[in-house]
Image (cartoon, grey):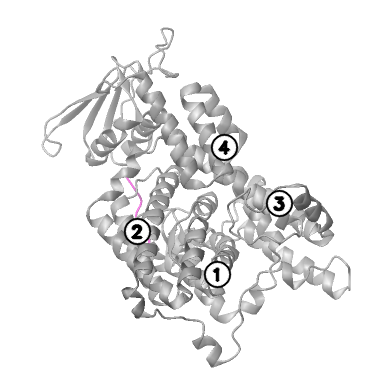
Amino acid sequence: MKKTKTFFGDIRENFPSGLVVFLVALPLCLGIALASGAPPLSGVISGIVGGLVIGAISNSNVSVSGPAAGLTAIVLTAITDLRAFELFLCAGIIAGLIQLVLGFIRAGSISNYFPNNVIEGMLAGIGIIIILKQIPHALGFDKDYEGHESIFDQGLNFNYFTELLGAIQPGAVLVTLASVSILLAWDHVPFLKRMKMLPGALVAVVAGILLNEIFKLSGSSLAIGSEHLVPLPVPKTIEDFKNLITFPDFSGFTNYKVWIAGATIAVVASVETLLCIEASDKLDTQRRTTDTNLELKAQGIGNLVSSFIGGLPMTSVVVRSSANANAGATSKASTMIHGVLLLVCVLTIPFLLNLIPLATLAAVLILVGYKLAKPATFKHFWQLGKFQFIPFVATVVAIVATDLLKGVGIGLAISVFYILQGNMKRAYYLSREKLNDADGITIKLAEEVSFLNKAAIKKTLKNIKGNSTVIIDARGTSYIATDVLEMIQDFANIRAKEEDITVELLGFKTSYRDYEKDEDSHVIITHKRAM
């Protein structure tokens, strides 16, 4: 049975991960606001609302919301076209209202149809982008803004590399190397890994600040200038504090351009959120399932609140969510802690935050990117066969070459092509009485089980109550999609143990490669959970 966790125990357990996300989110919030043509603090406001408001409403345990790089071009175009940020805030309110409607009409269910190889490809593609975009910051070349996720539009050409090589700062390189060393030590040294209340990212940030201050005090040429540090606005008077918040100009609701921008933001933000939620659930070590319809409602309320107090529109964000999961988050308390830290630190110690070298934060993000795109993931999909590997790699390449939505669209198209090429027969048969009254439940899988059947199987497994008996019969099945197989394994090995569900797996093979029958495969030994 699950142990009941106290409120303060939950806060204590998730404070280190919340701190890590705060350190990652701060420069991203500022960078995205800068790129969007909005006031610098609007991004931070969005991050605060994403942590406190969406974090409180959503039931996702690792997802973190905030201003998204995927919306930057839309926001910049809208602000430029409307010529007033106050008018644009009305578009954010409209986007929030539309997302609320999408949540109530249960549009979140479309996330069930994203195949596993595309979601994993999305994570790996984002990981590669993070690494490529943070390397210049790690070398002291901060021409590009933090949070920018496009590779080719800033000119990966000879002039760019010449400029990069000429701008390398030895001090920033030393800070990066020191930060990476600390982070790796915290990941691999058992004694340091056990220090949960002292996360490696915090130690790396403090070390980066101290190292740069030593460079400054000693008059060394290694000292990192203010243009390479976190650029947070520092209010000095009461009037400055009042000017931190911008309120919407409600006359914008009479402007059709505002409505077009609002509808566009709602659609793009909702799709990106659903993609990120599906990815976040895979990063959750306990494999808990997020209510995507509730998530859309939470995003809608969050965008309403953010827009009313001068914040940018937001989505659930892969970079922050993956940093959160990698830092050991176990509940949504982590994302709420990051929101509190953003609020408190921006209001009380912005001058201290402005001492943080961007090189240190680049080191944190580079390791996050590596964990998302580690070679083991590519090897895993290669071993699964071409029908899994090709859509995975296509998604990775397309995301790096274009953007998240286009990349996922290309990956989905290729996945669907291979699925349709294989078999369009009805892929599984469910034999059961009403779940509430049944003593035993039998799920009989048919010859072909693709990701198109994921939603129905997922819903069935989700509705199974504790202390039930479940038989999953795959004796007549020649192929099961990897994400469906992993979902069944997670159910049998994790949730069934926690809720005293007896699970019997019949006829499962050790591997299901592509759409070929494997005559030499062995049957998995039936797994029973003792009552």
Q: Earlier in the sequence, mark 1 or mark 2?
A: 1
Q: Is residue 434 above or below residue 241?
A: above
As helix, strand or loop, the secondary structure at mark 4 comes to helix
The reply to whether the magenta stretch includes residue 276 is no
Is the stretch drawn in magenta largely helix, strand or loop?
loop
The CA distance from mark 3 to mark 2 is 34 Å
Q: Nearer the viewer, residue 151 or 284?
A: 151
Residue at the (60%, 38%) spot, across then down: 374
Q: Residue 201 placed where, x, y %?
A: 63, 58
The residue under label 1 is 37
The CA distance from mark 4 to mark 3 is 19 Å
Q: Is residue 501 above or below residue 178?
A: above
Residue at the (38%, 61%) spot, across then down: 6
Question: Neighbour class for label 4 at 10 Å: few (<14), some, many (≥20)?
Answer: many
Question: What residue type is disc 3 on?
Answer: Ile
Question: What residue type is disc 1 on?
Answer: Gly
The CA distance from mark 1 to mark 2 is 29 Å
Asked if the residues shown at circle 1 and circle 2 are in contact, with their CB atoms under 8 angstroms apart, the answer is no
User: Would residue 527 be found to the left or right of residue 38 on screen?
Assistant: left
Q: Earlier in the sequence, mark 2 or mark 4?
A: 2
The CA distance from mark 3 to mark 1 is 24 Å
Q: Which mark is residue 58?
A: 2
Residue at the (59%, 85%) spot, across then down: 235
Q: Earlier in the sequence, mark 3 or mark 2?
A: 2
Question: What residue type is disc 4 on?
Answer: Val
The residue under label 4 is 397
Q: Which residues are magenta?
A: 1-6
Residue 25 visible, this orientation = yes
